[in-house]
Image (cartoon, grey):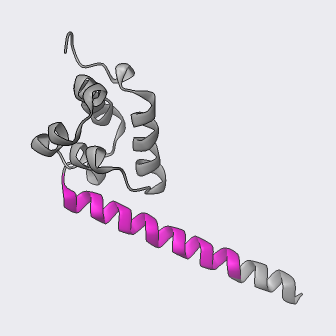
Amino acid sequence: MHGRPDEKEAPEQIIASLILYRDEGVPPGSFLEAVLANDLWQSVSKADEDNLLTLHHIVAWLHWNMPGDIWKSHERIESHLKECSRKRHYSFASRKRQAQREIAS
């Protein structure tokens, strides 16, 4: 690890996964869940070599781009995933009712 943490240096694949988690509630893998939970021991334990070398950049990206209420603890992660799941279920049910009305008319 050389230099200061730079969010622009975080790996693209990791950022894509974090954006899917943030915007769609797609569950992250075990490494990213540990990072999101602010669990340094598990983050380091689960990181592959590339992620270990860029962990400080990943955390910088989180600091600047992730709302604080959906990371920093396992409870916040679980709450965010449940809320996104509830929204998807409601959205699906709403679209299904709309399609049924269109078919009936």
- Residue 55, magenta (yes or no): no
- Residue 76, magenta (yes or no): yes
The residue closer to the viewer here, 34 or 75, is: 34
Question: Which segment is the magenta one?
Answer: 73-96
Q: Position of residue 61 (x, y in %)?
A: 33, 30
Q: Assign the C terminus to one quadrant of the image.
A: bottom right
Choose top left, top right, bottom left or bottom right for residue 26. Answer: bottom left
Q: Is residue 38 left or right of residue 50?
A: left
Q: Position of residue 5 (x, y in %)?
A: 24, 19
Q: What residue is at 15 percent from the left and 40 percent from the top?
A: 45
Q: Position of residue 18 (x, y in %)?
A: 39, 42
Q: Assign the N terminus to one quadrant of the image.
A: top left
The residue closer to the viewer here, 104 or 54, is: 54
Q: Extreme right residue here?
A: 105
The residue closer to the viewer here, 12 or 50, is: 50
Q: Is residue 15 left or right of residue 101?
A: left
Which is the main secondary structure of the residues drawn in magenta?
helix
Q: What residue is at 41 percent from the left and 50 percent from the top?
A: 21
Q: Extreme top residue here?
A: 3
Q: Extreme left residue here?
A: 41
Q: What residue is at 43 percent from the left and 57 percent from the top?
A: 25
In the rendered image of this protein, does residue 14 appear above or below residue 88? Answer: above
Q: What residue is at 21 percent from the left and 14 percent from the top?
A: 4
Q: Position of residue 9 (x, y in %)?
A: 36, 19
